[in-house]
Structure formats: structure tokens, C-alpha cells
Image (cartoon, helix red, strand yellow):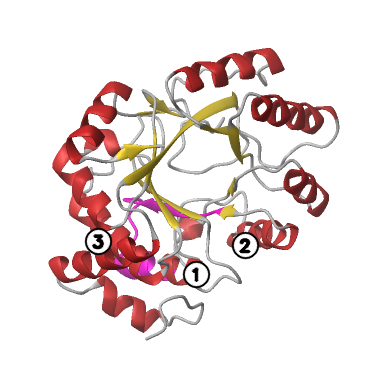
């Protein structure tokens, strides 16, 4: 069977997803070693250039202005503040940063030009840059391509069918249109989702199917486990078993062998053995730092100790 394909059916993905755990992990691990250097893990650090006061109503997010979560909003950081944070990351051996902003839409004018300056200055220091900033237009996508960012993150979050239960302030169609603009502009898209929102296995399969049948597979598929945050509508959701994330990663690796897979939010809830199985199943990227935007993340030294134990090289 052809391994790189965009014509997967939901039924085919469902069959992979529901395979016995050891079978799907073995299949995924084999493909992972075929398409990637399994001895390496890409590490990146998020820099929140604007935090909180978001107008969206994403039910999982502490940054929404609609919920009382205790997150202190701050205006967009200055160029110097962002450069200092990037230098701090570089000093720890981190080569890539992701600039994040709690915008619904990327603003026009000065704020966007300031963002381009941030990207340029960080790159001058020998680092690479990704962004996650909300919806954008064709011209902004083109300018980000010219700015040579590595990728732009814009998640689907869940299935088309379940999406209205999680977010009402934008549509699934809005998300897909943003991804189309990135693809058309030549910007690599970093697109994944979250499990543990109350969705079904069929919703997870549907999300993977949507990712796998885009015009182009994502450069990176970030997979997040919900971290229930006090004050949000999902604060009472139970913590998922790590087996559910391992199954998601293995299925994504089989269906999209060339994509990077980022084990993103929720690692703090996993023990070392669970994270190890995620890496075995095909995850080859993590975010480091004690916070992932507003959710807790493992300590940097603890991450490095685990990678050393596993014989994995952070790059």
C-alpha cells in the first residue's frame, strides 16, 4: 500500500485506530524509523508575545476574556523583550521559538510590522521561528512566507461535528480557510488538535481524517491532551489515560508518515514511561519550558534527563 497519500477514508483510519495497541505502535514505530531519524527530538519554546484578553470562547482556554481563570493579560511585548526571551532560550540550547499571540485575527499595520521585525531579529541570532497568531489574510500569509518562518500553527482542535460544542466564535470552515491560505502562500502548516474535550473516538478519527486529506499533510501535527483549567467550562473534565494519546500518535504516524508529531500540552500529566511510548510510537517534537502558554510543562532539566536516558538527541 502507498504510504504517503491524501485519499484515506475514515473507515481505513478507523481500522488503524482500533488495531490492538502493540500492533499499531509497532507499525507506527517502523514507519517512523523509515521517514525520520528516530534518535532525535526537536525541541522548541513558546514565547507569548500577547497573553490573555482573547475575544474567543474556546472552552478549554485560560486566555479567553469570557472566563475567570486568573490569567493576567498583558499587551504585546516589545521587540527588546522578545529578543531577550529568545536569547534566554538559545542559551539553553534551544534553536527554535514559536511566537504566540492571543489574537482572533492577526492585526494589520504596526502590530504586524512589529511581528515581522521580531522574526527578523531572532533569525539574525541564528534561531528559527514559528508562529501561532490566529486567522490571517492572503497578504499576511505571503509576508510570513517571505519572512522565512519554519511553520505557522493553526489547529483544528477536534472534528467538524464536535467543534461547535467547543467553540462558537469562529467556524471550522474559518480554520480550514486559514490553513488553505498558508498552503497557497507556501507556508508550512502546523496543525493538530486536542483530546480529552469530551469527544468520541469517532471524533478523533474524523480529525485525523481531515488532516490526512488536506491538499498537503501538515509539516507538524501537534497533539495535546486537555489540561483542565479552573474557571473554564471544561474544568471538570477527567484527566485522560496516557494510552489514549499513545494510540492517537501511533495512528497519526501511520497515516501521515512524513509529518513531524509534537507531543504538546499535557506532558506534565504523563510519567516518563508514557512519554517514552509516545516517542516510540512516532512523536519527535516537544515544547520545553515550565509553562506551555498557561498550562504546566515538565521542568527543562527533567526533560533533558529523560532524553539522555533514552539516548535521544535534542536539536
In x, y percent, where is residue 84? 59, 14
**Which picture quadrant has residue 15?**
bottom left
**Up-down relation of residue 177 to residue 15 (above or below):** above
User: Is 271 situated left or right of 160 in this image?
Assistant: left
> Residue at 72% of width from left, 59% of height from top?
181
Q: Tell me which numbered mark, 3 or 2, is placed earlier along the sequence.
A: 2
For the N terminus, the image quarter is: bottom left
User: Mark 2 to mark 1: distance in Å?
Assistant: 10 Å
Element type where label 3 sits in the image: helix
Q: Nearer the viewer, mark 3 or mark 2?
A: 3
Q: Earlier in the sequence, mark 3 or mark 1?
A: 1
Q: Quick one: SS at disc 2?
A: helix
Label 3 to label 2: alpha-carbon separation: 25 Å
**Magenta span covers which residues?**
190-206
**225 and 127: which is toward the camera:** 127
- The numbered mark at residue 176 is 2
Give residue 247's mark.
3
Badge 3 crowding class, 10 Å Cα cut-off, few under 14, some 14 to 19, many 20 or more, is many
Mark 1 sits on what residue?
210
Q: Position of residue 103 (x, y in %)?
A: 65, 36
Q: Is residue 246 magenta?
A: no
Res 286 quadrant in image: top left
Residue 238 rendering spot, x and y as whole percentages: 23, 44
Whether the residues at callouts 2 and 1 have beta carbons within 8 Å, the answer is yes
Q: Residue at x 68, y 48 (%)?
A: 135
Amino acid at each position: 500500500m502507498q504510504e504517503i497519500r491524501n485519499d484515506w477514508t475514515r473507515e481505513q483510519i478507523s481500522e488503524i485506530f482500533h488495531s490492538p495497541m502493540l500492533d499499531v505502535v509497532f507499525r507506527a514505530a517502523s514507519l517512523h524509523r523509515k521517514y525520520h531519524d528516530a534518535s532525535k527530538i526537536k525541541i522548541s519554546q513558546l514565547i507569548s508575545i500577547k497573553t490573555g484578553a482573547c475575544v474567543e470562547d474556546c472552552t478549554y482556554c485560560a486566555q479567553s476574556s469570557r472566563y475567570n481563570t486568573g490569567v493576567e493579560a498583558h499587551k504585546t511585548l516589545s521587540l527588546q523583550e522578545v529578543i531577550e526571551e529568545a536569547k534566554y532560550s538559545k542559551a539553553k540550547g534551544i534553536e527554535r521559538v514559536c511566537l504566540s499571540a492571543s489574537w482572533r485575527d492577526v492585526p494589520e499595520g504596526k502590530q504586524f510590522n512589529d511581528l515581522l521585525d521580531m522574526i527578523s531579529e531572532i533569525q539574525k541570532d541564528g534561531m528559527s521561528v514559528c508562529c501561532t497568531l490566529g486567522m490571517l489574510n492572503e497578504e499576511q500569509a505571503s509576508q510570513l512566507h517571505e519572512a522565512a518562518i519554519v511553520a505557522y500553527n493553526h489547529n483544528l482542535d477536534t472534528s467538524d461535528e464536535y467543534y461547535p460544542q467547543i467553540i462558537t466564535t469562529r467556524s471550522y470552515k474559518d480554520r480550514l480557510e486559514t490553513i488553505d491560505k498558508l498552503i497557497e502562500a507556501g507556508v508550512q502548516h502546523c496543525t493538530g488538535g486536542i483530546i480529552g474535550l469530551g469527544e468520541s473516538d469517532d471524533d478523533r478519527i474524523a480529525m485525523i481524517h481531515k488532516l490526512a486529506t488536506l491538499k498537503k499533510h501538515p509539516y507538524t501535527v501537534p497533539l495535546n491532551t486537555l489540561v483542565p483549567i479552573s474557571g473554564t467550562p471544561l474544568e471538570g473534565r477527567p484527566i485522560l489515560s496516557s494510552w489514549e494519546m499513545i494510540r492517537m500518535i501511533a495512528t497519526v504516524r501511520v497515516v501521515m508518515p512524513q509529518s513531524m508529531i509534537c507531543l504538546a500540552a499535557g506532558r506534565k500529566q504523563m510519567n516518563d514511561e508514557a512519554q517514552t511510548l509516545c516517542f516510540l510510537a512516532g512523536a519527535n517534537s516537544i515544547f520545553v519550558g515550565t509553562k506551555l502558554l498557561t498550562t504546566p510543562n515538565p521542568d527543562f532539566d527533567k526533560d533533558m534527563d529523560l532524553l539522555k536516558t533514552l539516548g535521544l538527541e535534542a536539536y
